[in-house]
Image (spheres, rainbow, N blue to C red):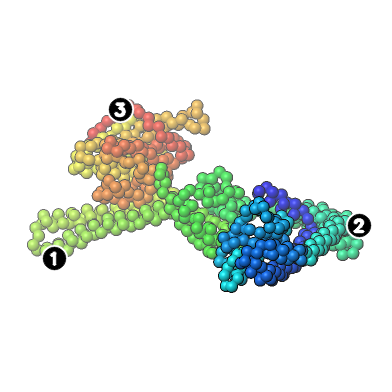
């Protein structure tokens, strides 16, 4: 059915507008004439039925008045004679039946010519209408010989019902002839109208349709970019003027195309290049939410390979689709102007991602909605930094408040109870205040160190002996390790080569990492400080190797969970779930990473929960007139037999 309907639509579309109008007008006139004919025939037939009904009632009442007494006295001979004369007197009577009150027919014309004296009449029975009275009952029905009007009259004699008279009346022949004539005239008019339409269509096809089709094909070619299209038909008058105007328009468009196509293409290329190279993701949609344009940044953010021509809701993951489907549909429907939207995606195998969307309408010069523009930013890092800064402020506030409170408390005690305190108590109070002051200084120094390292300041590098750095670190933390019951172990290669670095910065690295190791190692544990020389394969020249010094700090502490190892060097980051009771601001390892990067290297770690953690980094060996090498890091953990081993 659908294919038939499609074929009809295609067939109808092939006609010209004028032909369609003529066809519609013809159909309208035909329907009007048919309606008038139907009304006329129906009116004639209605009047005929009314006349037949009145005529049947009159005949039925007339005959009933003359035969009621004969039926009551059972004078059938006279009844047959009178009925025969009445039947022959009118050509409109189809039949006459007489029946008793139960409907049993005992006489009828033309089925019984006269009373059968031999008793061989066939029994017949009438279906008498319900509730028949002395008033005639009239009905009409169709038969193979035409329509018949039936009239039923109750025969009454001396107020006593004695039988039933049934009479059939044929329709008026004049009315039948009139209705047939009306139908013939209508058919002739209908055929004449369509003959005129066919002749008009043929004339139209010869004089108008051909040039109109040529013009339509020419306009389609112009719309498709073929400005070389011309129409050459020998027509004059208005149609000829239209053809000449069309050819002039095509010539101007061809000239305009030749003059401006290169400039338009250049501007389009500039726009596409600009959209493709901006850092934010850019997506352009049509009103059906199909992707019209998408840049590389958006493809990278969403992980798409191809998006143009596809519905954006089918490309987004379920979380993004749930957040964006309603705003996009409302904007496409003109119910919303746009705005900013932030969405946080919680991945199963990776950390959460935060995206910022700016959704705007694309309007034409006439302020008509043409599409939707979406700008996307991955603000995951920004959100993480804001959260980290909030944690940092909270941590620093806590770290500052505690020593300040202790300093204030002890100083107030000394001030108010100076005379009552012993010299030993005063010394203890002052010593505590001094330690809390050192704690404050370390906290402030950490913040200043990180700020200085990230400021791009240039540092002086010299030949540095790592043994001196390690020894000074061990001396600094020896007492702290002894108090906690932790063993500090130094393992360095004999004749360790000098490295190219900054002594103070390397000392700070060792201090931060050893301090962390002591903090997260339980009593009875060990902390190892190792330094040894090894040969690093040159990636650009595999047959050559570069001598480097590797530094390792290993502990037997609580370890670091795998999900925290990637972020352990981020500033302000602290592992809160298992060590939240330990002091710190989350800046130590961030400072270490920055210092090692200043030395054109990188710091690595290997950790197992409940076993311990190892941090290591590589430094370039000092050579005369050797510039600072480019950063080359390796994750290989080279095991060497260390000749020198000292316990502290």
Q: Earlier in the sequence, mark 1 or mark 2?
A: 2
Q: Which residue is mark 2?
A: 234
Image location (x, y in percent) of residue 339: 51, 62
Is residue 417 in view from this perspective?
yes
**As drawn, 576 above or below 97:** above
Give the quarter of the image for residue 350.
top left
Q: Quadrant of residue 201?
A: bottom right
Please state the horizontal and vertical placement of residue 6, each as a whole percent of the image.
69, 50
Circle 3 is placed at which residue position? Answer: 643
Name the mark nearer the viewer: 1 or 2. 2
The circle drawn on residue 416 is: 1
Residue displayed at 91% across by 62% down: 236
- Quadrant showing the C terminus: top left
Q: Secondary structure at mark 1?
A: helix
Q: Please determine whether, in this image, residue 66 is positioned above or below residue 231.
A: below
Q: Kindly report the distance in space between the C-alpha atoms of the residues bearing marks 1 and 2.
A: 121 Å
């Amino acid at each position: 059915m659908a294919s038939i309907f499609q074929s009809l639509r295609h067939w109808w579309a092939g006609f010209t507008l004028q032909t369609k109008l003529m066809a519609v007008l013809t159909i309208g006139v035909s329907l009007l004439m048919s309606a008038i004919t139907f009304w006329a025939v129906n009116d004639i037939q209605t009047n005929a039925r009314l006349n037949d009904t009145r005529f049947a009632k009159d005949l039925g009442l007339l005959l009933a008045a003359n035969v009621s007494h004969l039926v009551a006295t059972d004078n059938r001979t006279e009844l047959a004679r009178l009925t025969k004369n009445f039947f022959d007197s009118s050509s409109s009577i189809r039949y006459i039946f007489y029946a008793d009150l139960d409907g049993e027919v005992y006489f009828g014309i033309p089925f019984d010519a006269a009373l059968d004296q031999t008793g061989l009449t066939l029994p017949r029975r009438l279906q008498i209408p319900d509730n028949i009275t002395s008033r005639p009952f009239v009905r009409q029905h169709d038969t193979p010989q035409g329509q018949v009007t039936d009239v039923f009259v109750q025969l009454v004699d001396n107020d006593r019902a004695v039988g039933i008279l049934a009479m059939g009346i044929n329709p008026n022949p004049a009315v039948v002839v009139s209705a047939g004539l009306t139908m013939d005239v209508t058919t002739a008019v209908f055929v004449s109208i369509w003959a005129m339409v066919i002749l008009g269509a043929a004339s139209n096809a010869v004089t108008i349709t051909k040039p109109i089709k040529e013009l339509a094909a020419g306009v389609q070619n112009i719309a498709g970019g073929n400005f070389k299209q011309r129409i050459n038909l020998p027509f004059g008058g208005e149609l000829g003027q239209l053809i000449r105007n069309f050819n002039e328009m095509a010539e101007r468009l061809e000239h305009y195309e030749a003059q401006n196509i290169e400039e338009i293409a250049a501007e389009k290329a500039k726009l596409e290049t600009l959209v493709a190279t901006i850092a934010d993701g850019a997506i352009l949609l049509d009103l059906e939410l199909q992707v019209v344009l998408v840049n590389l940044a958006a493809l990278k953010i969403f992980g798409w390979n191809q998006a143009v021509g596809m519905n954006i809701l089918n490309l987004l993951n379920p979380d993004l689709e749930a957040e964006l489907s309603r705003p996009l549909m409302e904007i496409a429907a003109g119910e919303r102007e746009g705005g900013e939207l932030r969405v946080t995606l919680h991945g199963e195998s990776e950390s959460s991602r935060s995206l910022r969307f700016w959704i705007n309408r694309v309007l034409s010069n006439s302020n008509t909605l043409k599409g939707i523009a979406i700008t996307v930013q991955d603000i995951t890092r920004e959100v993480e930094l804001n959260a980290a800064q909030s944690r940092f402020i909270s941590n620093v506030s806590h770290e500052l408040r505690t020593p300040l409170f202790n300093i204030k408390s002890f100083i107030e005690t000394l001030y108010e109870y100076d005379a009552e305190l012993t010299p030993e108590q005063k010394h203890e109070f002052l010593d505590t205040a001094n330690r809390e002051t050192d704690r404050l200084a370390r906290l402030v120094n950490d913040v200043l160190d990180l700020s200085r390292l990230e400021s791009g300041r240039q540092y002086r590098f010299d030949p540095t002996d790592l043994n001196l750095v390690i020894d000074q670190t061990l001396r600094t933390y020896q007492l702290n390790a002894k108090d906690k019951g932790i063993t500090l172990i130094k393992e360095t290669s004999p004749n360790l080569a000098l490295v190219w670095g900054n002594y103070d910065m390397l000392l700070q690295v060792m201090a931060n990492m050893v301090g962390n190791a002591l903090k997260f190692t339980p009593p009875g544990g060990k902390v190892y400080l190792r330094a040894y020389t090894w040969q690093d394969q040159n990636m650009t020249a595999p047959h050559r190797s570069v001598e480097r010094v590797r530094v390792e700090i290993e502990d037997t502490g609580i370890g670091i969970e795998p999900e925290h190892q990637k972020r352990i060097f981020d500033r302000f980051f602290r592992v809160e779930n298992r060590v939240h009771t330990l002091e710190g601001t989350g800046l130590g390892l961030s400072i270490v990473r920055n210092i090692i990067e200043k030395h054109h290297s990188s710091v690595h770690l290997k950790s197992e929960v409940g076993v311990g953690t190892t941090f290591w980094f590589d430094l370039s060996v000092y050579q005369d007139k050797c510039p600072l090498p480019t950063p080359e890091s390796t994750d290989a953990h080279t095991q060497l037999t260390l000749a020198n081993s000292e316990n502290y």
